[in-house]
Image: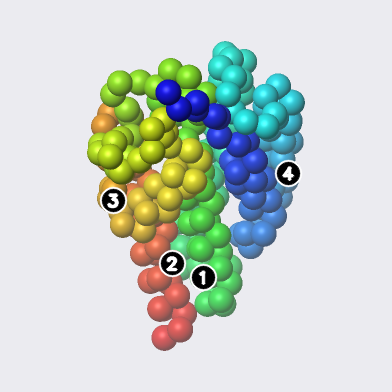
């Protein structure tokens, strides 16, 4: 039987750090102290997770599970705030984003922020988390990857890791619908539908305002 190893911790940790830095580079006006709230909440949670379970993710723990969900919730709330602020700005005609380059870069950064956040949500929630997918994989997955639907396409012992969920978050944001990964449970369907709605709202409003500025 092929020995299964836990996935490495650093890919999702790097994405968390990128999301923590995002509020400082998104040029939305009147940010105030908001950019500093996320690092104060997210970095201690990330440090605690890495300290308790460094290296590969192969340890199941209720404490780690709580810390991971809390970190993801903080990132999700921050992405929601950034999205709402951008949408309100665009609905008002983007009075503080009158330069097309600034408008497009801001929209792109917020869009990327939501995509990375949803990738982390899928990764954290699917099958009870990474450690659970390694040690106690469920018979019926929340998100069905092609390798699970057709085991002949994958090596023995395959299970989805963070890059697979990163790809899912990107393709769902671009296609506004499932591509090769199928949502099988209600929460997965609702989460993917929500991401599609957010993505189409951001892209359509950004493009409409950019066309208006350039014309």
Specify the farthest residue to the top. 62
Residue 32 image point, x, y percent: 71, 50
Residue at image x 39%, y 47%?
Answer: 168
Q: Which of marks 2 and 4 is nearer the N terminus?
A: 4
Quadrant for the C terminus in the image: bottom left
Residue 60: assigned label: none
Residue furthest bottom as drawn: 215
Label 2 environment density (alpha carbons within 10 Å; few <14, some 14–19, many ≥20) = many
**Mark 3 crowdedness (10 Å alpha carbons): few <14, some 14-19, many ≥20:** few
How far across and down, in percent of the image, does residue 93 sit?
Answer: 46, 68
Q: Residue 104 carries which label?
A: 1
Cβ atoms under marks 2 and 1 closer than 8 Å = yes
Along the line of sight, which residue is nearer the eye, 181 or 199? 181
Q: Quadrant of residue 66?
A: top right
How many residues crowd around disc 1 within 10 Å: few (fewer than 14), some, or many (20 or more)?
Answer: some
Disc number placed over residue 179 in the picture, else none: 3
State how far apart marks 3 and 1 are (Cα): 26 Å
- Where is residue 199, by image quadrant? bottom left
At horizontal 58% and vertical 24% (from top left) the residue drawn is 58
For the N terminus, the image quarter is top left
* Spot occupied by residue 128 in the image (x, y as percentages of width and height): 44, 23
Q: Which of marks 3 and 1 is nearer the N terminus?
A: 1
168 to the left or right of 116:
left
The reply to whether the C-beta atoms of the residues labelled 2 and 4 are less than 8 Å apart is no
Q: Which of marks 2 and 1 is nearer the N terminus?
A: 1
Compared to residue 24, the image places residue 124 above or below, namely: above
Assign a secondary structure to mark 1: helix
Q: Which of marks 3 and 1 is in front?
A: 3
Quickly name the residue at label 4.
36
Separation of marks 3 and 2 at Cα, in angstroms: 24 Å
């Amino acid at each position: 039987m092929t020995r299964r190893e836990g996935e490495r911790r650093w890919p999702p940790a790097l994405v968390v750090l990128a999301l923590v830095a995002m509020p400082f580079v998104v040029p939305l006006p009147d940010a105030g102290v908001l950019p500093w709230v996320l690092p104060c909440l997210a970095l201690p949670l990330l440090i605690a997770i890495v300290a308790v379970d460094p290296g590969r993710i192969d340890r199941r723990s209720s404490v780690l599970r709580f810390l991971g969900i809390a970190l993801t919730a903080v990132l999700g709330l921050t992405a929601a705030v950034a999205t709402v602020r951008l949408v309100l700005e665009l609905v008002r005609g983007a009075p503080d984003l009158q330069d097309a380059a600034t408008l497009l870069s801001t929209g792109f950064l917020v869009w990327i922020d939501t995509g990375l956040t949803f990738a982390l949500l899928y990764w954290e929630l699917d099958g009870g988390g990474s450690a659970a997918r390694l040690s106690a994989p469920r018979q019926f997955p929340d998100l069905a990857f092609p390798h699970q639907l057709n085991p002949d396409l994958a090596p023995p012992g395959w299970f989805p890791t963070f890059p697979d969920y990163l790809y899912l978050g990107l393709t769902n944001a671009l296609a506004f619908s499932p591509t090769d990964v199928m949502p099988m449970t209600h929460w997965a369907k609702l989460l993917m539908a929500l991401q599609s709605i957010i993505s189409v709202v951001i892209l359509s409003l950004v493009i409409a305002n950019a066309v208006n500025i350039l014309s």
